[in-house]
Image (cartoon, rainbow, N blue to C red):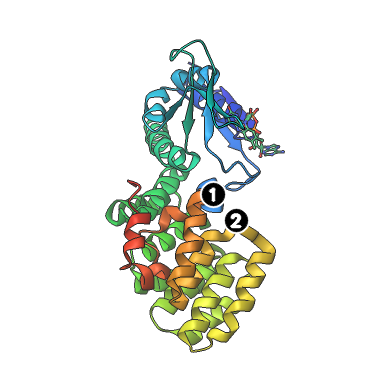
Amino acid sequence: MSAARQVTIIGAGLAGALLATLLARRGWQVDVFERRGDPRVHGYAGGRSINLALAERGLHALRSADLAEVVLDKAVMMRGRMVHFLDGHQELQRYGRDDSEVIWSVSRGELNITGAYAQFKMALRLAPGDAANIRDYADFVSRLGHAGEALRLSDQVIALDPLSISSYAIRAAVLVNAHEYSEAVRLSRDLQRKSPALFDWPERLALALLLLGRFDEAQHYLDISPADSYDHLVIESALLVRTGKSAGVPSRIARIRQLYGDAASYQYGQIYSQLGDSDRAFSALDHAWQIRDAGLLKIKVDPLMGPIRSDPRFGALVSWGL
Ligand SMILES: Cc1cc2nc3c(=O)[nH]c(=O)nc-3n(C[C@H](O)[C@H](O)[C@H](O)COP(=O)(O)OP(=O)(O)OC[C@H]3O[C@@H](n4cnc5c(N)ncnc54)[C@H](O)[C@@H]3O)c2cc1C
């Protein structure tokens, strides 16, 4: 196998992701560039919110990447479409001759989590010392609440790649998800003082300070973060609630709606949770679930969900087996 076999793939859609997987398995060094955000972080772009229909061609591709089993485990068989006539009778129009010719329906949200585990494990096997792989996996498991593993992995990332902002950014995120707010503040402030070029997460630091009740300092870091990012607007709303200025929150919600619309359903849930408005929070989170909003991935560890965590509806929402 030649060490010089390298390829760059533009686009991590179905074709790009599969090709990258198959080439990497054959020993190629593959770099993939994707212009859309990570759907686990930013939600789905392009409105593909309904279930994915998987037919034989897709299954063939998944088999070639050893992923068919893990995906079919989450799939529901669709034999055909049911036609409802005006006189009330129904007729099944089969997709194929019999049950050997069917398509499969898979929830995109669940697919991402199941598939993500499988892909992360595979990536770590293929390139065990790759800091970016370990960093992404640390982020993933941290959102699912595996704090110990995430902290250990983020230590490893910093040791492997100590000059990258991302290494420290993920460490700070892992600390916040582990509810180690003082430690997140210490790390961020140390970096800001000693190596300012390695610090660029003022919103995350503002959140940690807010959760420690250090409101003036939280406001300072919000002031230096991009005003229209949804993290900024959510944390600012939480700060307004905690400083007795809830009257300012509706204008922030309106701004998020104007900028991000339904894609910020999880964020509306966070803000209504902070306001103690459980009904609105669950209505937003139900919608987030319907559109498989990737923000839900961190619902178990999200400190902003504190006020609604003991509600039985919360338990129902997180019982999807993460
Ligand atoms: C609403 C909708 C629903 C669908 N539902 C199904 C379904 O249920 N089942 C099914 O089998 N098929 C479905 N399809 C079709 C399926 O999505 C496509 O057949 C499939 O995505 C094609 O794969 P691809 O890799 O060729 O392209 P894409 O999946 O579109 O991937 C191309 C990728 O390249 C990225 N890209 C483009 N330009 C650049 C650039 N300059 N730099 C970096 N990245 C770039 C894009 O962001 C994109 O992620 C659906 C399509 C749509 C629009």
The vertical placement of 210 against 118, above or below, is: below
Outermost residue on the bottom side: it is 244
The vertical placement of 43 against 250, above or below, is: above
CA distance for labels 2 and 1: 8 Å
Whichever of callouts 2 and 1 sits on the residue coming sooner in the sequence is 2
Residue nearest the observer in this picture, 141 or 48: 48
> Dividing the image into four equal quarters, which quarter contains ligand 1?
top right
* Residue position for label 1: 291
Image coordinates of residue 162 in percent, x first then y, are 45, 54
The vertical placement of 63 against 247, above or below, is: above
Q: Secondary structure at mark 1?
A: loop
Q: Secondary structure at mark 2?
A: helix
**Left or right of residue 255, residue 184 in this image:** left
Image coordinates of residue 269 in percent, x first then y, are 49, 65
Residue nearest the observer in this picture, 92 or 39: 92
Outermost residue on the top side: it is 97
**Left or right of residue 31, residue 305 in this image:** left
* Residue position for label 2: 263
Instruction: Name which residue type carries label 1.
Output: Ile
The answer to whether the residue bearing label 1 lies less than 8 angstroms from the nearest atom of ligand 1 is no
Instruction: Name which residue type carries label 2.
Output: Ala
